Image: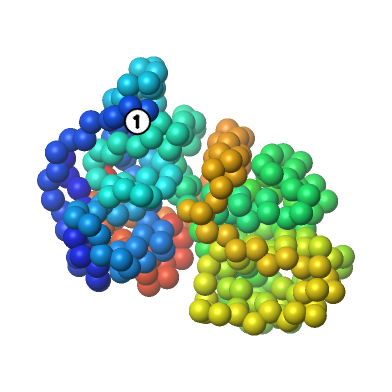
Amino acid sequence: MKAIIYTTTGDPDVLTLTDRPLPEPGPGEVRVRVRVSGVNPTDWKARRGTAPDGEKVPNQDGSGVIDAVGPGVPPSRVGERVWLWETAVGRGDGTAQQYQTVSARQAVPLPEHASFDLGASLGVPALTAHRALTVADGGPRRLAPGALDGRTVLVAGGAGAVGNAAIQLARWAGATVLTTVSGPDKAALATAAGAHHVVNYREQDAAAEIRRLAPDGVHIVVEVAPAANAELDLAVTAPDAVVAFYASDSPAMEVPIRASMTGNIRWQGVLVYAVPSAAKDDAVAAVTAALADDAIRVGEKAGLPLHRFPLERTGDAHAAVEAGAIGKVLVDVAD
């Protein structure tokens, strides 16, 4: 089978196309014929990070069809359409290959109405967004329709992949959703994703505008740039709010201590790979329910443009994400 591998860290050109043996599923595993592989920032960061021990196949997320099962997995799962999450954690195999074996838990049924593109776009972004939306005191632990009724959510960077997922999941759960963007093109994407209000922080006084739109304050902030936005977040949060940050725009951040204490504001880090197992299961279940309700979409009309590359150009796909492509970068593994 065809696969993309790297054996050393470096630029995207360390990714090479090769032939590998067809893997066999072990106990509790399924083998998936991968259709689409999704690329996330952590994929290129891993490629530039710690040198792999032997061959490593990149990319955590993907979608495809189960074509074989190992001992302990019902044979009825063969032929099932699935989306895949965190497939390369603790192992050398990601989704940039034609076939992949994963634990049955990591191959989640994909509804017939949901495309393989959508399935490959979930994983890291959707599970990160779910965690950020469920770490507030008092819950909810798992999103569902009505779970965020009466809550106001601010999504910083609503045109990004996590921001897009957070907007869609928060809307599905009943929240009033505000988002900040840096320009009109990104504003159009955030609106398409479903944000009720979009604030262009380069053209408006963001704090004043958010306070006008949410006079009682924001209950949950899904934050992509905590160092840059700490002052803004404190200016717009309601008492007992949480700022859930999932990315690093600086090695350190300065948090106004007294204001955080006065408002009882919690600063919560979110790294999807370190989320507790029970919380991860809740996230997967919630995303599955949102898919069933057709509440998560991808593509330009959903505020998440798709950028496609064939398997042999996985290096170019990584370069696009590393360069800050707006939307979702996908690799077509099989027709």
Is 37 situated above or below 65?
below
Residue sitting nearer the eye, 210 or 184: 210
Secondary structure state at the residue bearing disc 1: strand
- Taking 178 as reference, is 87 left or right? left
- Taking 333 as reference, is 107 left or right? right
Residue sitting nearer the eye, 282 or 28: 28
Is residue 325 visible to the viewer in this orientation of the structure? yes
Residue at horizontal 13 percent and vertical 50 percent from the top: 18
Residue sitting nearer the eye, 49 or 319: 49
Residue at horizontal 35 percent and vertical 30 percent from the top: 29
Q: Position of residue 300 (x, y in %)?
A: 49, 55
- Occupied quadrant, residue 67: top left
Q: Residues within 10 Å of mark 1 (few under 14, many from 20)?
A: many
Is 145 situated above or below 244?
above
- Occupied quadrant, residue 158: bottom right
Q: Residue furthest right?
A: 216
Q: Position of residue 217 (x, y in %)?
A: 82, 66
Q: Position of residue 212 (x, y in %)?
A: 83, 71
Residue at horizontal 34 percent and vertical 63 percent from the top: 46
Q: Position of residue 311 (x, y in %)?
A: 23, 51
Residue at horizontal 46 percent and vertical 65 percent from the top: 326
Q: Quadrant of the N terminus?
A: top left
Q: Amino acid at mark 1?
A: Glu
Q: Which residue is mark 1?
A: 29
